[in-house]
Every structure is written in structure tokens, then in C-alpha cells.
Image (cartoon, rainbow, N blue to C red):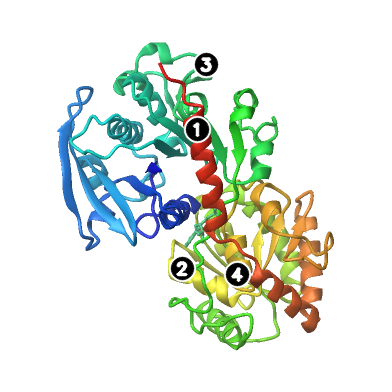
């Protein structure tokens, strides 16, 4: 199948979260299955600054925009990548969505509308490129206007829209519709209007042929008022077109037996390297090097979704249980500040690094004993899967992809791979941690749990096969006009 995969992040070139890892892993796995996949991505300045091999493919001006832009082509491994190059994407500072002060870029709507429009033009054969897809796969709000532009440009190609996180919807004032050259008839509750605003995500939810999200449980959760983020009615309406496919992980990049970013490699057969990684991690965070003290790790965007405030309330009690805690993240300034202050107060037991560091993320996965994910909601979550692969036992909340990927010690001890906190509260979190620590000190039991977790197969192959079917279903349900 010829697949155009439209996305706003791509690891390792540009990453704020799991979307980037998916954009790198899924096209690669689909390519390995024999499909012809092209990733379409903005040419952010930070990507152009890398010494990539880049070719100019096309240059044009769309009738609906005065901007002159060009399409560049590059590749990552076996995957072909096309980059939409505009002066604005080039000049972006900070991450793709926010500047260094955490404010949304002023022309975010225009830029991601352009990404969608270019995707529709490619799909419609309206560029100089001969290649045309059979399926356009859009991801999250940043590319959600693609099916809308496909409709407006009369492009008769199937589309799939993947929800990676329903919380982020791309909501803009209604007048934005005009700046984007979208017709006013789209400003309707059955189209792009949402409580008086223009909603990008509704483009994908209303107009794509099929919709999916990144775990079976989250697919059910988002059809309820509790997790539907105000869109549960629409999702219920499209329930027959909505499925959940659990993300995979890139088992080459996240492999403790070959990982170049960790202090010592190891495998389930020989765990000595993990001890060295633990000592190195304690050293990085200036904590006492104690091999019998359980080290708890967390890597996350520091936002309410990730339950950081709940963790903050639970931490004094958890630290009294004789553990060390290491945290890597960036996000809301009040959460950054509170974590930093707590780490100063408990400087012999807790270390916090505010920022984004791929290398430190690998070191935490390898060096910690236990990984914390007390998320309020989690569409899929990748870190719990990385953790299991690194023999770092996850403690997760009972939601979304976390319960689809972790088996609780209490529920099925012979298949257990971690600990699940039901009814997430600070008390429930520190009680579950206490249970994990108790097991950690029973060395044989813990080793069994670690080995079982490390044996789990979360590779992309299985998920890629499900996407294959989903693409076929989208093509079959394409309405021809
Ligand atoms: P989300 O997509 O909601 O952020 P996921 O668990 O799906 O959450 O994926 C997060 C990805 O981003 C993981 O690969 C994680 O290691 C990475 N990540 C998050 N914050 C940081 C950080 N501060 N430094 C390095 N990697 C990070």
C-alpha cells in the first residue's frame, strides 16, 4: 500500500512526546512489511540544522495562500521523509507548538493548516510529484484538517485519523477560519465548530473515513463523558468507525543489550550491567550510591495529565519508605518549581532534572528499579513499555494503554509485569509503592518479575499489521462522489 503519513513530530529529529516515537516506529515497521510509506513533516529549522541529506522535490504557491513554499525530501533509515519548508516553520523557536516562554506560536493555526493542505495536494496529485497515496494517515490536531482539504480539493483518497491525545484539540477563535481560507459552511456543529471556536481535531473526527486511537481501553474511555474531553458525543456517533490499536516501541533503539546511551549494557540473562547503570544514575543525581536502596524513576511532560501533583502529595510519605526518586521532565512552571523545591528539601534522596534529554531518559530507564506513571489518563503511554524492556518495574494508574500493557501483581501473579493503582490518590500511590518496595526486598520474587517484564514483546510488528487492516478498511469505506 502507498501510505502518506502526516505528522508534526518525528524522533529523533523533533520530539516533545510519544507522537514523535510513533512517527518514527510505525512507518519503519510498515516499510518492513513491504509498504511504500512517505512521512510528511514540517521542515523546522532544527531539522534543517542537522546535517541530513536533503533534496528539493518541488516548489509552488497554492492558490489559497500567498506563501511560496517548497517540498524537500530526505530519509531516516529506510523511511522516506518529505519536509514542508516555509519561512515560518524554518524560523520557529522553542518546540513546534510553543516558544521558550511556553506561549503558543502566533501562527500555529496557519502553519498546521498549511501542512494539511500540502498533504491534500500530494494526495490529489496536485503537485509535480508523480507519487500518490492510496491512504492518507493523519495524526492528532496538527494534521487533522487534511481530510477537510481533501474534501475541498475533491481528492478521492481514503483517510485515517489517529487520536494520540484527545486533550489537545487545536482550538482557535472562529475568525481563524477566514485566515485559513476555509469556507464558512464548515463553521457548523456537525463540522469544525466547537463551542464558538474553530476546532482542528474535529476535521479528523468528522471527515476521516476511519478513526483510531492508541489503545483499546482509551478507545472505549473517550466515548464517555469522563474522558471524552467534550467530544464523547461525536465519538459515540462514530463508534463503528473507531478502534484502538496499542502502540509498539522501537525495540532497536530501546534495547538494554545494545543501548549506546547507557553506562553498561545488560540482558535478562546477565543483569550485572543494570547495577552499574544504577550506580551511575545515583551519581548523576548526586545521590548516595547504595545498591540496596530502590530507585524510583519518572520521565514525563510535567502537566496535570501525568499526575505530577498527585505524586507531589505522595512523595513525602514515599520518601519515608527509604527510597530514592529521580525525575526528568519539563512543562508547567508551577510543577517544575514544586518538584525542584522538594528535591532541595530531600537532597539525599531525590533528584530532579528540568529539561528534555534523550540520553538521561535512557539512563533513567536503565538505572532505576521502579518506574512511576500515575497518569490521570494515558492514551497509550510508552515509558511503561520501555521500562519493562529495561527490567524497571512500572507502577501505573488504571487507565488507557497502561492497563492494556501492564499486568498487575495482585490480579495475575504468574503473568505479572508491574503494579496497577486503582482509584488514583496520593494515599493509593504511596501504598502501592510500599507493596512494590516490599517485593523489591524479596530478591528471588523481584528477579522473576523483572525477567518476565523484560520478555514482553511490544515491538511494532504486531501493531503495524493491525494498521494494515485499518488502512484496508478505510479504503473499503471510502465514499466516492
Ligand atoms: P506523551 O506522549 O503523553 O508525552 P508517552 O509516554 O506516550 O507520553 O511518551 C513520552 C515520550 O517522551 C517518551 O519517549 C519519553 O521518554 C519522552 N519524554 C518525555 N519527557 C521527556 C524529557 N523531559 N526528556 C526526554 N524524554 C522525554
Mark pair 1, 2: CA separation:
31 Å
Q: Nearer the viewer, residue 216 or 323?
A: 216
SS at badge 4: helix
In front: mark 3 or mark 2?
2
Quadrant in which the N terminus is drawn: top left
Residue 350's label in the rendered image is: none
- Mark with earlier residue (4, 1): 4
Q: Can see residue 154? A: yes
Helix, strand or loop status at disc 1: helix
Closer mark to the observer between disc 4 and disc 1: 1
> Reading the chain from its start, which is encountered first: label 4 or label 3?
3
Sequence-wise, the earlier of marks 1 and 2 is 2
Q: Is residue 283 left or right of residue 222?
A: left
Q: Quadrant of residue 133?
A: top left
Viewer-side residue, 206 vs 352: 206
Mark 2, residue position? 253
Q: Position of residue 281 (x, y in %)?
A: 54, 79
Between residue 261 and residue 279, name the one nearer to us.
261
Question: Please, what secondary structure does the residue beneath circle 2 have?
Answer: loop
Quadrant in the rendering for residue 175: top left
Q: In front of the other: label 1 or label 2?
A: 1
Q: Which residue is mark 3?
A: 190
Res 6 visible: no
Mark 3 or 2, nearer chain start: 3
Cα distance in 3D space between marks 3 and 2: 42 Å
Distance, label 3 to label 1, CA atoms, is 21 Å
Q: Position of residue 164 (x, y in %)?
A: 53, 43
The quarter of the rendered structure image containing the C terminus is top left
Q: Is mark 4 within 8 Å of ligand 1?
A: no
On the image, numbered disc 1 is attached to which residue?
Answer: 474
Amino acid at each position: 500500500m502507498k501510505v502518506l503519513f502526516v505528522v508534526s513530530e518525528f524522533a529523533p529529529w523533533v520530539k516533545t512526546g510519544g507522537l514523535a516515537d510513533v512517527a518514527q516506529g510505525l512507518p519503519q515497521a510498515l516499510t518492513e512489511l513491504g509498504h511504500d510509506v512517505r512521512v510528511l513533516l514540517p521542515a523546522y529549522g532544527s531539522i534543517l540544522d542537522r546535517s541530513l541529506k536533503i533534496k528539493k522535490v518541488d516548489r509552488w504557491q497554492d492558490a489559497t495562500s500567498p506563501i511560496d513554499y517548497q517540498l524537500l525530501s530526505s530519509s531516516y533509515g529506510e523511511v522516506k521523509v518529505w519536509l514542508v519548508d516555509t519561512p515560518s516553520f524554518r524560523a520557529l523557536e522553542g518546540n513546534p507548538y510553543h516558544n521558550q516562554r511556553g506561549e503558543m506560536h502566533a501562527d500555529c493555526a496557519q502553519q498546521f493548516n498549511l501542512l494539511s493542505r500540502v498533504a491534500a495536494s500530494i494526495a490529489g496529485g496536485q503537485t509535480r510529484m508523480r507519487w500518490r497515496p492510496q491512504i492518507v494517515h493523519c495524526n492528532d490536531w496538527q494534521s487533522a484538517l487534511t481530510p477537510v482539504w481533501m474534501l475541498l480539493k475533491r481528492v478521492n483518497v481514503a483517510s485515517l485519523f489517529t487520536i494520540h491525545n484527545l486533550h489537545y484539540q487545536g482550538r482557535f477563535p472562529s475568525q481563524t477560519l477566514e485566515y485559513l481560507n476555509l469556507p464558512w459552511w464548515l463553521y457548523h456543529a456537525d463540522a469544525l465548530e466547537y463551542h464558538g471556536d474553530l476546532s482542528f481535531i474535529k476535521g479528523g473526527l468528522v471527515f476521516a473515513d476511519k478513526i483510531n486511537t492508541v489503545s483499546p481501553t482509551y478507545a472505549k474511555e473517550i466515548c464517555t463523558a469522563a474522558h471524552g474531553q467534550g467530544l464523547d458525543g461525536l465519538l459515540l456517533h462514530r463508534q463503528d468507525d473507531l478502534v484502538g490499536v496499542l502502540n509498539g516501541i522501537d525495540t532497536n533503539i530501546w534495547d538494554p543489550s545494545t543501548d549506546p546511551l547507557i553506562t553498561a549494557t545488560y540482558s535478562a540473562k546477565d543483569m550485572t550491567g543494570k547495577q552499574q547503570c544504577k550506580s551511575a544514575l545515583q551519581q548523576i543525581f548526586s545521590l548516595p550510591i547504595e545498591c540496596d536502596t530502590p530507585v524510583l524513576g519518572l520521565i514525563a511532560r510535567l502537566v496535570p495529565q501525568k499526575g505530577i501533583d498527585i505524586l507531589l502529595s505522595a512523595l513525602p510519605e514515599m520518601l519515608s519508605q527509604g527510597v530514592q526518586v529521580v525525575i526528568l521532565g519539563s512543562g508547567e512552571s508551577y510543577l517544575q518549581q514544586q518538584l525542584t523545591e522538594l528535591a532541595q528539601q530531600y537532597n539525599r534522596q531525590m533528584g530532579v532534572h528540568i529539561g528534555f534529554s534523550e540520553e538521561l531518559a535512557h539512563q533513567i530507564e536503565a538505572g532505576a528499579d521502579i518506574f512511576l506513571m500515575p497518569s490521570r489518563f494515558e492514551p497509550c503511554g510508552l515509558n511503561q513499555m520501555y521500562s519493562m524492556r529495561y527490567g524497571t518495574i512500572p507502577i501505573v494508574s488504571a487507565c488507557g494503554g497502561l492497563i492494556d500493557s501492564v499486568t498487575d501483581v495482585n490480579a495475575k501473579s504468574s503473568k505479572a509485569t508491574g503494579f496497577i493503582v486503582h482509584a488514583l490518590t496520593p494515599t493509593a500511590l504511596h501504598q502501592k509503592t510500599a507493596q512494590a518496595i516490599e517485593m523489591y526486598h524479596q530478591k528471588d520474587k523481584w528477579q522473576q518479575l523483572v525477567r518476565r517484564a523484560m520478555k514482553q514483546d511490544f515491538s511494532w510488528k504486531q501493531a503495524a499489521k493491525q494498521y494494515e487492516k485499518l488502512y484496508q478498511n478505510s479504503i473499503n469505506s471510502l465514499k466516492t462522489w
